[in-house]
Amino acid sequence: MHKLDEDSLHALKVAFCYMPKAIEVNEYDFAGRVEKILQDINTVREILLINDIDPDEVYGDLNPDDSPNSSY
């Protein structure tokens, strides 16, 4: 895998913010698609990590006014 250019990386980060979190994926809401959706989420997380982006920090990076302040 190669690193993304800045525009592509930004677009991926925005899309990732709108993806469901893995913990939110269940058979009731995503009948018959749970495994596929979890694979897609993991694929995006891996691409972010390859590009030195912590997936758990993406939302806060893009939405600093809507994120809690860290206490550490």
Image (cartoon, rainbow, N blue to C red):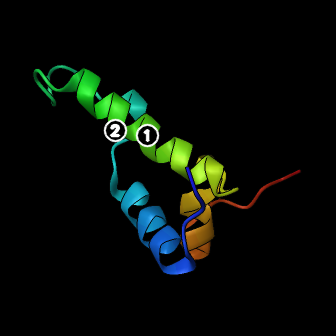
Q: Tell me which amino acid carries mark 2.
A: Asp
Q: Residues within 10 Å of mark 2 (few under 14, many from 20)?
A: some
20 or 10: nearer the eye?
A: 10
Residue 43, image x, y percentages: 43, 40
Considering only vertical position in the picture, is 68 above or below 39?
below
Q: Which residue is mark 1?
A: 43
Q: Tell me which amino acid carries mark 1.
A: Thr
Tell whether 34 sits left or right of 62: left
The structure residue drawn at horizontal position 34% and vertical position 38%, both measured from the top left corner, is: 40
The structure residue drawn at horizontal position 34% and vertical position 57%, both measured from the top left corner, is: 18
Measured in 3D between alpha carbons, the distance from the residue under mark 2 to the one under mark 1, in whole angstroms, is 5 Å
Number of callouts: 2
The image quadrant that residue 37 belongs to is: top left
64 or 58: nearer the eye?
A: 58
Residue 42, image x, y percentages: 45, 35
Q: Which residue is mark 2?
A: 40
Please identify the residue farthest to the bottom as the structure is shown.
Answer: 7
Tell whether 3 sits left or right of 26: right
Please identify the residue farthest to the front as the structure is shown.
Answer: 1
The structure residue drawn at horizontal position 63% and vertical position 50%, both measured from the top left corner, is: 50
Disc 2 secondary structure class: helix
Task: Evaluate if marks 2 and 1 touch, with contact meaning CB atoms under 8 Å apart.
Answer: yes
Residue 72, image x, y percentages: 89, 50
Tell whether 40 sits left or right of 71: left
Residue 6 circle label? none
53 or 21: nearer the eye?
A: 53
Considering only vertical position in the picture, is 26 above or below 53?
above
22 or 64: nearer the eye?
A: 22
The image quadrant that residue 65 belongs to is: bottom right
Residue 63, image x, y percentages: 54, 71
Tell whether 57 sits left or right of 31: right
